[in-house]
Amino acid sequence: MYLFPRLRLPQAAIKAAQLEGVSPDVFYAHRLLDATGIAVVPGSGFHPDLVSSCKKVSGTSHIRCTILPGEETITAMVPSLQAFHEAFMDEFRG
């Protein structure tokens, strides 16, 4: 199963990404991997037509997730992903 979720990242996260010299989606993907071990692909690595077909909105980013594990693993993975995202957003909202 593939997911290509849209991320609406806070301006502070976008600025932090710029300071590191990477796009916001790359910044998010690296932080996710470091925090959880969950690997995703930054949407900026895909052909622009794919991103535009997902209704790219100014100020948004995307990541691509490929979900291959069994149901038991997904049940454990989803809360980790949710907890990371909530903590990331809280950190950069101010």
Image: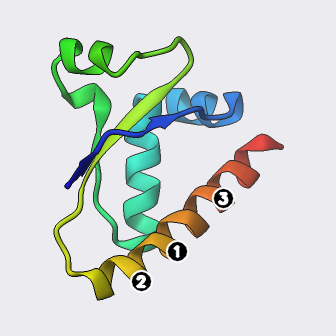
**Dot 3 amino acid type:** Glu
Q: Residue at x 48, y 65 (%)?
A: 81
Image location of residue 86, percent across then percent down = 66, 58
Q: What is the secondary structure assignment of the residue under circle 3?
A: helix
Is tag 2's residue or tag 3's residue first in the polypeptide sequence? 2
Q: Which residue is mark 2?
A: 76
Identified at 21% across, 81% down, the residue is 70
Residue tagged by mark 1? 79
Relative to 87, residue 21 above or below: above
Q: CA distance from mark 2 to mark 3?
A: 16 Å
Q: How is the image coloured?
A: rainbow
| Front one among 1 and 22 | 1
Residue beneath the point at 44% across and 42% down: 27
Q: Quadrant of residue 32?
A: bottom left
Binning the other alpha carbons within 10 Å of mark 1 as few (below 14), some (14 to 19) or many (20 upward) gives few
Residue 94, percent from left and from top = 83, 43
**Distance from Cα at disc 2 to Cα at disc 1:** 6 Å
Which residue is the site of mark 3?
86
The image quarter containing residue 10 is: top right
- Image location (x, y in percent) of residue 43: 30, 32
What residue type is disc 2 on?
Ala
In the picture, measured across the screen, residue 70 lies left or right of residue 36, that is: left
